[in-house]
Amino acid sequence: MTRMMPVAADLMEFAPDGVRLVAGRRRSDGKFAFPLPGGPAGAEYERVTLDRIGLLWSWTIQRFCPKSPPYAGGDAASFRPFAIGYVEIPGQIIVEARLLAAFDSLHLGMRMVVDTLPIWTAADGSEMISYAFRPVELPEVPA
Amino acid sequence: MSDVFVVGAGIHRFGRTPELSGLEQGVHAVREALADAGVEWRDIQFAFGGSASAGNADAALPLLGLTGIQFINVANGCATGGSALLSAYWAIKSGEFDIGIAMGFDKHPRGAFNPMPEDSGLPAWYGQTGMMLTTQFFAMKIRRYMALYGISTQTLALVAEKAFANGALAPHAWRREPVSAEAVLAAPMVSDPLTKLMFCSPAEGGVALVLAGEKRARALGRSGVRIAGAAIRTRVEGSFEVFSPSLDVVRGPSPTSLAARAAFEHAGIGPDDIDVAQLQDTESGAEIMHLAENEFCADGAQERLIRDGVTRLDGALPVNTDGGCLACGEPIGASGLRQIYENVVQLRGEAGERQVAGTPKVAYSQVYGAPGLSAVTILQR
């Protein structure tokens, strides 16, 4: 079985009901930050996980293969366009993420849920996993 | 405190000039600006200069003359040129100097910029997962704006069509051929809804402006163009900027809105007084959104206004009269200064085929740069 490795430590939390994003809530004013701030600034934040469901805030399609480095998802020969966007987790924060959805289905206010996404295979065979949002089959609310 | 005047303006043609380094293009612009002002390099008391990819701007000193002047290198992203100008402006305004120069040049490799996450204080995974692209930010900003305010893709195309039409009339522009809105829409999609012809490209070029205090400007017979207002503002919390893994749910104003307001207040005039404007057009959508952020119209009014030709050369508010970044390309160190060069030429009535009718009296420029700053300059005749 392929071993799965997150692209960074303390970016996601894995639970039986699905993945959650790890964020920070500033102790002084309750503002959220994602990813969880590290270093000296980290002391100002309480570690929290974000709600899993949000509303699509904006999106685009990445049509050309990003330059590598920094991109680690493959080369021009294997590249397939992918969707990317911002998803608003109501009352918390707006998160930038890869999107797993049919391009022509994307629209503002679309209800989405966080999921995982393999990005590349490491030298030891591990699948490097990041986060993404995919549509939720639920009634929609306006943005 | 003295009023400050632009007494000389010089430019090296934007685009690709394989036979000259970026530095040589900058020096070309300085010599042209000096000749335009009717002064010699030894008359210049200070300089602010910037270049992002073509070496330190002060490498121009051995070529221009080692006169021992104060030379400060400026680095402020895409707003480097605007920042050099503002620094020179304040230097004269303070009364410390009475003549100096703001210069900028650049020479970028072909293709998109290749930023690394670490340079922006971001984790490596942000780049590894395919999110470290400025093109995505521009596309997502205009995508949301279009949905909220009813802007069509046809309007995006009309902005690019106008840019290339104006560029065809500007000797310093890179792209000198008109391109139809249909061709703009038919170009390969880069980052939906923006096609290749809706984006500017990194390029080459150089610009220099000689600034002087009132007494000196009058002595030179060059007191025609005065800097009436100038401001730089940076991002505040809630501003939507490039390379943001997350955004605050409480949205805030853009640095452009803040810089615009500050510059208008500084100049004591309002957007209705502006006769011609150069607005940052990294891509078509930026020009559309910047029309509102700079207070020239309400959000959403652009759809009608652009269709009606208001921003064309013969419209009520001509915008990006030399084709802007779309037709000139974007050499980072020089780009903001090009806007001011164009406004000086327009105010003097020396813009030839692209001259705005009625000889404009007040000209506006706004340059925006990552990671979230805007520089606005208002010139008055």
Image: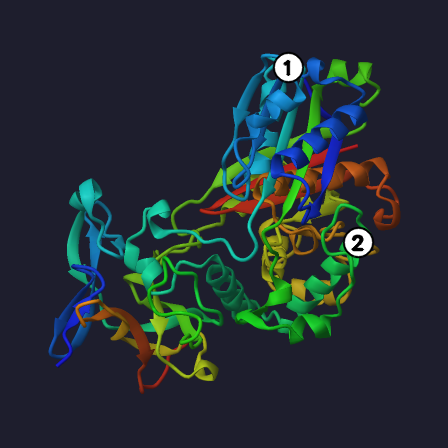
Tell me the distance, in whole angstroms, between the alpha carbons under discs 1 and 2. 40 Å
Of the 4 image quadrants, the one containing the N terminus of chain B is top right
Residue B316's disc is 2
Q: Can residue B376 be seen in this view?
A: no
Question: B261 and B376: which one is in front?
Answer: B376
Which residue bears the numbered disc 1? B45
Instruction: Looking at the picture, tell me which residue is in the foreground, B342 or B95.
Output: B342
Tell me the chain of label 2.
B
Q: Earlier in the sequence, mark 1 or mark 2?
A: 1
Residue B77 appears anywhere in the view: yes
> Percent x, y for residue B119?
36, 45
Which quadrant, please, contains the C terminus of chain B? top right
* Spot occupied by residue B360 in the image (x, y as percentages of width and height): 82, 41
- Determine the residue positioned at 72% across, 25% down: B5
> Badges 1 and 2: C-beta atoms under 8 Å apart?
no
Q: How crowded is mark 2: few (under 14 residues within 10 Å), some or many (20 or more)?
A: some
| Mark 1 residue element | loop
Q: In this view, does B242 lie above or below B24?
A: below
On residue B79, the disc is none
In this rendering, which labeled residue sits more in front, label 1 or label 2? 1
Q: Quadrant location of residue A69?
A: bottom left
In front of the other: A86 or A5: A5
Q: Which residue is drawn at 61% across and 64% down?
A: B300
